[in-house]
Image (cartoon, grey):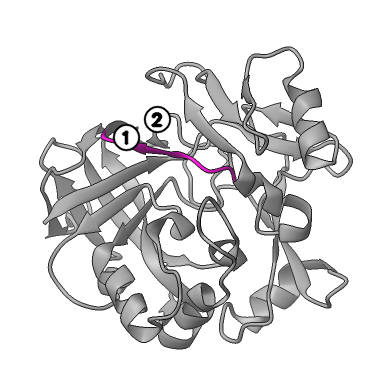
Amino acid sequence: MAVTALFRYPVKSMLGESLERCRIDERGVVGDRAYALVDVETGTVASAKVPRLWGGLLGFSARCAGDPERASPPPVEITFPDGSVHHSGDPDIDAALSAAVGREVRLVASPPDGAGFEEVWPEIDGLAPEAVIAATRVRDEDTGERVSRFDLAAMSPHPAFFDLAVLHLLTTATLRRLRELAPGATFDERRYRPNVLLDGEGEGFVENAWPGRAIAFEGGATVAASIPTMRCVMTTLPQGDLPRDADTLRTVAKHNRVLIHGMGTWACAGVYADVTGSGELAVGEAYELRDAEPSGH
C-alpha cells in the first residue's frame, strides 16, 4: 500500500499543485490553504461551493514559491484565467483579484474573527441531513437552491481556512468504484481535492471503515482518521480540462450515504484526518492501517 499522489492548495478554492513530497504537522500540509479571498461587502470567505459567486476561482491556480515554512505565510504565485501571473506580495494583488472575479475582495492569510463560508445545495437527493440544511440556511439562490453558512475549520486545532479538518485522504479504490457505478461520468481525483491519494488493498468505499483508525507512513508521519468526507457541489464544477458533470456528485449521493455519529447521514467519499505525528510524506512511500492507540497511551 503506497501514496499515489500529494496535493496542496495554497489559496482556498483555487486549483492547487501536485507534489512529490510535502511536510505535514498538526495544521495539515504546510502551505495548504495558506490564503483565502474575503468578500469585502459581506466578510464571507470566498468558496466555490457557491458557484454563482465564486465558481470562477477554479479558473485560477496557485502554487507556493519555494519551500513553505509554518512560521509565516508563504509567498504564493497565482496564475489568473487569462494566463497572467501575480504574486501574493504584489501591492496591487487585491485590485487585480477584484477585477478578475468581479467583486471587491482581499487576499488574506488569517481568517477574520467570526468568518465563515457559504455552500449551495443543488437539487440532488441525499447530500446532507435535511435538519442540517434547514438549521444553517441563510438565503436562497434565484434557482431556488438553498444556501447554508458554516464556520470555518470546525475540526481544526487552530484557526484556518479549511472547511472542516486539516487533512483529506482519498483512495484509488473509491475512485474505481465510482467509475464502475457511472462509467460515463468524469471521475478524477482533482474534483475531490484530496491532500493525499492512497493506493491499497480492498474494493469499494474502503475509507468508510477508517474512522477511529491510524495511518502510519513509512517516513514516520502518522494521522488518525476522524470522519468520512462529506461531498458538495464543488465536485461537479468545471476545472482545468474537466467539464461540468453533476453525475460525479449524484453517484456518490446515490451509492455512498454514510451515517456520521452525531451528525446524521451524508453523501461521502474519502476521509478526514488529524495529524498525530509530524513528518514528511512522499509519493511512492508505503503506509499501513493500524488500530487506534487506546486512550491514555
Coordinates of residue 67 in the picture (x, y in percent): 37, 19
Q: Say if residue 3 shows up in the picture.
A: yes
Asked if residue 190 lies left or right of residue 243, the reply is left
Q: Residues within 10 Å of mark 1 (few under 14, many from 20)?
A: many
Is 239 above or below relative to 253? above
Q: Main secondary structure of the magenta part?
A: loop
Coordinates of residue 52 in the picture (x, y in percent): 78, 59
Q: Say whether residue 235 is magenta.
A: no
Residue in the image at 33% along x and 60% along y = 170
Q: Residues within 10 Å of mark 2 (few under 14, many from 20)?
A: many
Coordinates of residue 16 in the picture (x, y in percent): 48, 40
- Under circle 1, the secondary element is strand
Residue in the image at 28% along x and 73% along y = 176
Coordinates of residue 242 in the picture (x, y in percent): 51, 59
Is 219 above or below relative to 190? above
Write down the region rendered in magenta.
13-20
Cβ–Cβ under 8 Å for marks 2 and 1 = yes
Which amino acid type is marked by label 1? Ile
Residue in the image at 59% along x and 61% along y = 234
Asked if residue 14 lies left or right of residue 107, the reply is left
Question: Of residues 27 and 125, which is closer to you in this image?
Answer: 125
The tag earlier along the polypeptide, 2 or 1, is 1
* Mark sitting on residue 24: 1
Q: Mark 2 points at which residue?
A: 30
Question: Of residues 121 and 249, which is closer to you in this image?
Answer: 249
